Image: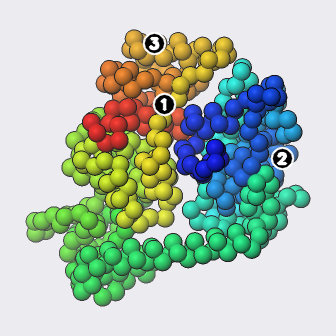
């Protein structure tokens, strides 16, 4: 996100310690009050309740159309005093169902709004944080009325400390940027065709199944390969849940050397998915095409997957990796977020606070148990979340010394809990895995 601070804009990862320190910096002149003010990327709410849903949605849409931002629950609007969430307000925030909240966004806005939530302990008080990513597909438009705040066809934008209907200059800039991005996508497509050769490339229409001007090669975006199964002509095999295409000749993903196929052999092209990326790292598996694993992150729903391990295997530093990612064509916003991870403060380490809150003391105890390798893989529920947060607090030296043990724990937890985890738990797990990846392979250097 683009964040405020000290006379310049800087790009940060959501919920980074630097962001949190900036938001919760106390005033030297107003005792017990925060120095931070509401602005183009920050809004305070004293409490959380579903009666305020329309205003929350409006603010989030305004953030998405601008530079992203934080909604902070548990801080008074006027004096910016952190009072924390408590009672019903705290229970409602902790009970937010990510699926239902996402549905609320999708019911009232299009295209979709990417968001994340997290709790933060401050002086024994629980603060609720909701982060909204800057949209990669602006403008985000209201598609359904709700209360007095949301009106169909409106586009909201964040102006200083207010969320308002967008004005002409900002809308003009969004539309011009959108047009420039589409032109860049066209250029990327044309470069891919040029690399294959205009006489040897065909365009495959996924809706009609028609190949136009086919000359021996198919031009198919790599992000689609995981959704398709190919078989040789005159052979048949059904892959559950995937469309099956009859293939005459062979198919090659762009940028991958051609493989020689023996006559009559069956060809199946398998995509690389999030679980493959995570498990290959945790197992330290030797992969023949590490760059394909990096590219595959761009097509996932999250950019928080291990990447430095594959950079190390490919012999790439961060700048070479970013250069490679700039050439990846995909609709997901994960490519942009992955580049942000590489270009900015990448650390996923989450130092524990100095609070005397019982949960904080528990995390310190778990961190000590991790260093003694006493935590077992049968942990679940709330204890698992505490274990993940404690693991994120370990130093790089601790992670390297206990690498095999920590990776074994994470693999067991990932296999056992990830598919059924809440979005918050899944996010904790991904970020913890990313932290271990970074500690072991800092920026791609083993």
- Residue 171 falls in image quadrant: bottom right
Task: Look at the picture and state if 38 lies above or below 446.
Answer: below
Rendered image: mark on residue 349:
1
The residue located at (27%, 43%) in the rendering is: 312
* Residues under numbered marks 1 and 2 in contact, where contact means CB atoms less than 8 Å apart: no
Q: Are marks 2 and 3 in contact (CB under 8 Å)?
A: no
Depicted 240 relative to depicted 358: above or below: below
Q: Which residue is mark 2?
A: 52
In the rendered structure, which disc, 1 or 2, sits on the residue that comes first in sequence? 2
Residue sitting at x 72%, y 52%: 40
First of labels 2, 3 by sequence position: 2
Residue drawn at 73 percent across, 61 percent down: 157
- Categorize mark 1 by other alpha carbons within 10 Å: few (<14), some (14-19), many (20+): many
Tag nearer the camera, 3 or 1? 1
Looking at the image, residue 159 sits to the left or right of residue 118; the answer is: right
Q: Percent x, y for residue 220? A: 34, 71
Q: Position of residue 430 (x, y in %)?
A: 47, 38
214 or 318: nearer the viewer: 318
The label shown at residue 369 is 3
> Which of 413 and 32 lies nearest the eye of the viewer?
32
| Mark with earlier residue (3, 1) | 1
């Amino acid at each position: 996100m683009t964040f405020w601070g000290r006379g310049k804009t800087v790009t940060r990862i959501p919920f980074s310690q630097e962001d949190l320190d900036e938001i919760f910096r106390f005033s030297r002149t107003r005792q017990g009050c925060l120095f931070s003010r509401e602005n183009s990327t920050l809004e305070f709410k004293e409490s959380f309740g579903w009666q305020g849903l329309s205003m929350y949605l409006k603010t989030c849409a305004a953030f998405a159309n601008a530079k992203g931002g934080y909604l902070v629950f548990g801080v008074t609007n006027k004096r910016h005093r952190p009072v924390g969430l408590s009672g019903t307000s705290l229970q409602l925030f902790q009970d937010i169902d990510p699926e239902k909240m996402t549905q609320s966004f999708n019911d009232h806005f299009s295209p979709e709004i990417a968001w994340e939530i997290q709790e933060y302990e401050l002086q024994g008080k629980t603060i609720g944080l909701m982060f909204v990513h800057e949209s990669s597909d602006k403008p985000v438009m209201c598609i359904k009325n709700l209360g007095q705040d949301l009106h169909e066809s409106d586009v909201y934008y964040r102006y200083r400390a207010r969320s308002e209907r967008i004005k002409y200059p900002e809308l003009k800039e969004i539309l011009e940027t959108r047009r420039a991005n589409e032109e860049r996508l066209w250029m990327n497509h044309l470069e891919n065709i040029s690399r294959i050769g205009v006489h040897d490339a065909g365009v495959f229409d996924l809706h009609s199944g028609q190949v136009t001007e086919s000359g021996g090669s198919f031009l198919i975006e790599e992000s689609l390969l995981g959704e398709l199964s190919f078989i040789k002509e005159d052979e048949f095999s059904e892959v559950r849940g995937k469309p099956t295409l009859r293939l005459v000749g062979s198919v090659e993903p762009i940028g991958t050397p051609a493989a020689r196929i023996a006559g009559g052999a069956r060809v199946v092209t398998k995509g690389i998915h999030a679980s493959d990326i995570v498990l290959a790292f945790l197992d330290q598996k030797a992969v023949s095409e590490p760059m394909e694993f990096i590219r595959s992150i761009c097509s996932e729903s999250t950019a928080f997957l291990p990447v430095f391990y594959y950079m190390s295997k490919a012999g790439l530093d961060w700048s070479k990796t970013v250069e490679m990612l700039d050439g990846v064509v995909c609709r997901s916003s994960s490519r942009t977020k992955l580049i942000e991870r590489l270009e900015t403060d990448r650390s996923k380490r989450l130092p524990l606070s100095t609070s005397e809150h019982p949960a904080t003391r528990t995390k310190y105890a778990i961190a000590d148990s991790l260093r003694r390798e006493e935590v077992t893989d049968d942990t679940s529920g709330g204890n698992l979340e505490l274990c993940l947060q404690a693991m994120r607090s370990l130093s790089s030296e601790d992670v390297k010394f206990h690498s095999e043990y920590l990776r074994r724990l994470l693999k067991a937890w990932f296999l056992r809990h990830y598919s059924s985890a809440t979005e918050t738990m899944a996010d904790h797990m991904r970020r913890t895995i990313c932290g271990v990846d970074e500690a072991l392979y800092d920026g791609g250097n083993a």
